Image (tube, grey):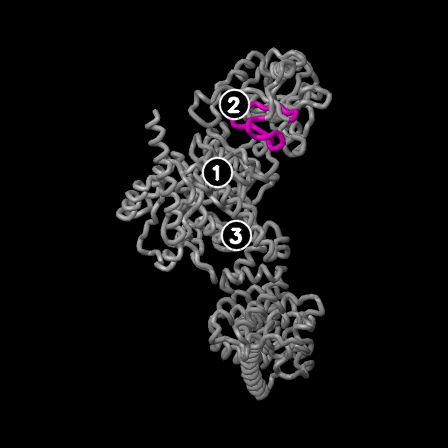
Amino acid sequence: MVLTRSKKRVAKSQTPPLKRAEKPQALALKRKAEKPQALALKKGGAKSQKTPPLKKQKKEVVVEEDPSEDDDEEVSDDAAASTDVESDDGEEEGLGSSGFFSDDDGEENDDDGEELLGDDFLEGSGDEEEHSDSGSGSDSDSDEGDIEKESKLIDEEEAKEEEDAKAELLDFNKEAGDDAFRLPTEEELEEEARGPPDLPLLQSRIKEIVRALSNFSVLRPNGASRKDCVEQLKSDIASYYGYNSFLIGALFELFPPVELMELVEAFEKQRPTSIRTNTLKVNLTRRRDLADVLLNRGVNLDPLSKWSKVGLVVYDSQVPIGATPEYLSGFYMLQGASSFLPVMALAPQENERIVDVAAAPGGKTTYVAALMKNTGLIFANEMKLPKVLGEKSVDRVLLDAPCSGTGVISKDESVKVSKSLEEIKKFAHLQKQLLLAAIDMVDATSKTGGFIVYSTCSLMVAENEAVIDYALKKRSVQLVKTGLDFGQDGFVRFREHRFHPSLNKTKRFYPHVHNMDGFFVAKLKKMSNMKQASEDDDEALGTVDEADVPSDDDEAEAMEEMEKPKKTKESKEGLAKSKESKKGKKSKSKKGEDPPKIKKQRKNRTEMRMEISQAREEKRKAMREKSKEKQ
Amino acid sequence: MRPLDENETTVVFEKIFKFVGNNLKNIVENPSHEGPGPKPEAGRYCFRLQKSRVYYVSESLVKRATNISRKNLVSLGTCIGKYTHAGSFHLTIMSLNLLAANAKHKVWLKPTSEMSFLYGNHVLKGGLGRITDSIVPGDGVVVFSMSDVPLGFGIAAKSTQDCRKLDPNGIVVLHQADIGEYLRDEDEL
């Protein structure tokens, strides 16, 4: 049977040797035991090393079955032998597989279809051209001369292919190089603008430009300035991800291109849902217990991270996490991980008076209450701050200011397009006012408190560092460490701004670094109840030059508080001086860092003030003495 | 915000009495542990009326809240109920913690029927796990889950004895309020 088939094949085959060669390979793998010869022929162009072993196997099988085989088979034997010599690793595997195949091989179905299939199946790469007439039977030529020719041809083909491949690779590089080295011209841009944005093109261009920008001197596109590349990148990102140009520009100023891509990608995805266990509830005070109960309900969760003892992150849940009986009973609260941070920084103590200036929806307020263990007084305010609270009446203030929301784009995509420079400025103005009001509410002389925590869910410097810097100038407050030991430090300088050096105690959090919403946290300590802070507060710490006339007590306390951060000598001098004048002028604590220029410029004003208050002091003194005399 | 007058106080106390009975004394004279300042000074709890809502709040908080104008004050302490336009008083779900702590009559639900109650349905005999004795029809009953989590409250429809004889679909407790209302009736609370 085998013989006849092969003979048939021979008769059929008019195709060039290569094609025939391929078929046997496929066939071999396809468990055609009948074509050992073809296989033998194939060996030259063998891309699969399996074929030699297969052939061998089949040959053996054939031999076993039909000892009286033709010359063909012998030829194939030789060929097979040679191929065996050639074949390297695939042998064992080939043997295994061929064994399998040969077992299945009941009969020979020389279907061209099968061969075709086999060819396609086996020879995915390359050789596609040669596939065409698989039907014609790749069977062997029995002629040895032909075999040699064929093998030569196969070799040539291989060599050609390699060259082609190399050339292709070069071309590809060139093309890629072309893209990177060539920014789209204006006509191309116009064309693009006409139709809907071509997303894959945009994405590839974005990647190219980012790559170029990262190593600009080497990879720069011909004739394009850095600015052009950046502009093109901005507009590409804007149209690909859906941002307006202002926001992209603002983000560009904050991050280098590679990090910007990470940030933008992070904004496309949701941050993981997290919950906070309510430690006030009697039954489930411990996070573990709540976790157990929720696990029973079918919620997949884990502790949030090592910096929080009450947080849990929810991966997925069979029941809606906001509607379990536990939630309705108040055992936990749905709260983003970033919202834990300002409350942790605030660190409210028991029996304190706390104000939450922007309390809705109440997650942070209730966390404060939980930390205070249900003691003390919390004033949860939303909207306009009523004047009734007055000044100096509160121990701590939490101000989670209304902001542009550029850090929580993953929650609210409309931020991408709705924010403009005007809005940012408006927010900044509002935030400054709120912060000053908050600072005024705090009693600096509080025994346990005197802290203000300012936080926003925005990444913009105008809403974060700039606001804090403004407060430092306008009030006698100082930045202290937030108590959060992770996160990036805030900016001390940014573009044309130069902030107070203590700004590096503030913290910034990013979605692509910390896997929580973009956030900014700053903790201020109120040094004194003076309203007017010194204007040259840029580099000196905690200096206050008051224009008001404070009470003696306040002054003394304020002096004490200010002594802490100050260095000894200077502050003592200051104290001595102020005590002389009796109504505190807190002298500036010069650490020798004050630029003399600024001092001189402002000296006049401060000197005048000092004189004025001195004069007032003396008047009062005189009054008191008079009254004493009268008595 | 003003303290309750005579009539109002009697009405509120009556409603609470249905649920807590003699424990009413505990509620009214509870030494407060909330509020700033040293503990004993924080004073006791009292009831205040603000915008037809009755609040249960400790005296020290009340003192501070008096400064806030009526239109700015949203809430203080714990709200326990509302006055309707008609003038009758209803206890709302937010009084649950207060009631549950002092409840005289309790009912425990099987896990399977928890969700049904949380949707606002009445308690059927088939869902009953445990029940305290000596319940008289018309009593206030607090509904718990088997893990002692308070779920809501209602009015008893049958006495304890009758409950035993009841068929599984009979109503045992008429629903008045449950914690599912926090989701369903968010706006009205």
Residue A353 horizontal/vertical position (percent): 46, 33
Marks 1 and 3, how far apart at CA: 21 Å
- Identified by mark 3, the residue type is Glu
Q: Which mark is nearer the camera, 2 or 1?
A: 1
Can the viewer see residue B145? no
Which contiguous range is marked in magenta?
B51-78
Label 1 amino acid? Met
Q: Which residue is mark 1?
A: A441
Disc 3 marks which residue? A463
Image quadrant containing the C terminus of chain A: top left
Which of labels 1 and 3 is toward the front?
1
User: What secondary structure is marked by label 3?
Assistant: helix
What chain does mark 1 sit on? A
Tell me if residue B94 can be seen: yes
Q: Position of residue A217 (x, y in %)?
A: 47, 75
- Is B103 located above or below residue B77 in the figure? above
**Most foreground residue, A240 or A4:** A240
Q: What residue is shown with label 2?
A: B58
Residue A580, quarter of the rendered image: top left
Say if mark 1 contacts mark 3, CB within 8 Å.
no
- The residue nearer to you, when weighing A112 against A282, is A282
For image coordinates 57% across by 80% down, the residue present is A171
Q: Is residue A576 magenta?
A: no
Whether discs 1 and 3 lie on one chain: the answer is: yes
Q: Residue furthest left?
A: A569
Which corner quadrant holds the N terminus of chain A?
A: bottom right
Q: Residues within 10 Å of mark 2 (few under 14, many from 20)?
A: many
